[in-house]
Image (cartoon, rainbow, N blue to C red):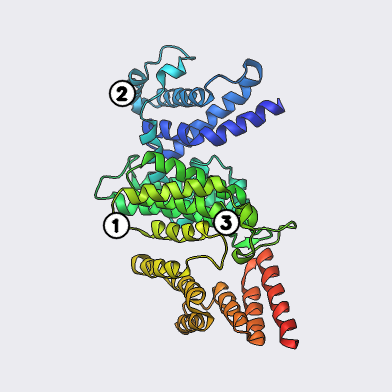
Amino acid sequence: MEATRARIDAIWRIESGRVIANVARLVRDVGLAEDLAHDAVVVALERWPSTGIPPNPGAWLTMTAKHRAIDLMRRDTTLQEKYALLARDLGVASPEPDVDAELDDDIGDDLLSLMFTCCHPILSVEARVALTLRMLGGLSTPEIARAFLVPDATVGQRISRAKRALADAGIPFEVPSADELPPRLASVLEVVYLIFNEGYSATAGEGWMRPALIEEALRLGRILAGLAPDEPEVHGLVALMELQASRQAARTGPGGEPVLLADQDRRRWDRLLIRRGLAALERAESLGRPVGPYYLQAAIAACHSRAPSVEETDWVRIAALYELLAGVAGSPVVELNRAVAVGMAFGPEIGLQSVDALAAGGELDRYHLLPSVRGDLLARLGRWDEARAEFERAAAMTRNTRERELLAARATECAALAQE
């Protein structure tokens, strides 16, 4: 029984998005579709331990959920006509239909519609992330809460309110029209990348990374690339995530402590992910459309991936790419990253000037990486006392335990060098 339950959990994690998407197209309500899909899982938990898991479990769950939808409509006299149309569409003839024969062919469109619905701009960013992980990732509310270090109740409320908001606003379950596509696609990409970033550099908690979120974001990105093959920014995002994820094994030491890029053993970088990332970058380039922010960030990551060492990295190209990125999607964080590249390309004094000019604006006063970057540049200039103070300030600002330990260790190192 326990083994079957574990297999059902794994099947749900893989198939939930397809099941919910297929049912949502019929009932036009993602919240109701999820409820029906969960009902199908309950039926599976009751039957499969004795009957065995069917050859196509995703199809079985989909058709079972659709039949639950029909049962619901039978009980609602105001939807009799809709039930009749739906029943004819499904060709329902028995409680155990031939699920392989009755699967819809346009599941790709359904999945894409579900992505756009979960990431609709009327929802807050936090709600979009939670709903996407729930609907397309098959994660439970406690799993999402643990991933983002918030109470279960908070995530539950976000998901419930999001479903209600979509239903109340009558958001259509469909792929947006051509004129609506760019902003809507940007919202989807933002959500996927937010999930990846939280996995790659956890904002709080004990762990430096959260591998499960990295894997989920990669899975969602690859699905999206398959569903929207002509969108260069989709391939740009996939390239960026693949290339960054390739460093995962080298980013922590034996005790889970963070290892910075300059100190990583590049032999531990995943060459398969690098090849996949570079291929996705080439795919984005081949579409011949204007470059976007994800493509540019992926091009920067590709410079690191191709370099044998930090010293042999093309920092001049990286600085130029950051300048392009600032023109396309400028932000203080982009400018801070550009200052790092400038410092590597043209010397720490030039980089420090850029950082100090940025600090004067005050927009990154509460961003712990500003003093961290400044500390690194000061250390490279041998200004140990100033560097120590910056690392201590950065350590006090971060909410991630591992990062705090790293910054505190760097402050201690600078203090020791200042005494020599």
Residue ID at (65%, 17%): 50
**Front one among 321 and 82:** 321
Q: Which residue is mark 3?
A: 200
Q: Quick check: 73 above or below 319?
A: above
Q: Is residue 241 left or right of residue 86?
A: right
Q: Is residue 385 left or right of residue 79?
A: right
Quadrant for the N terminus, please: top right
Residue ID at (31%, 22%): 85
Label 3, label 1: how many angstroms apart (C-alpha)?
Answer: 28 Å
Quadrant for the C terminus, please: bottom right
Tell me the SS state at disc 1: loop
Residue ID at (35%, 58%): 292
Local packing at callout 1 (Cα closer than 10 Å; few below 14, some 14-19, many 20+) is few
Q: Earlier in the sequence, mark 3 or mark 2?
A: 2
- Measured as percent of width and height from the top left, residue 39 is found at 54, 29
Q: Which residue is mark 1?
A: 290
Residue projecting furthest to the top = 93
Q: Quick check: 264 above or below 38?
A: below
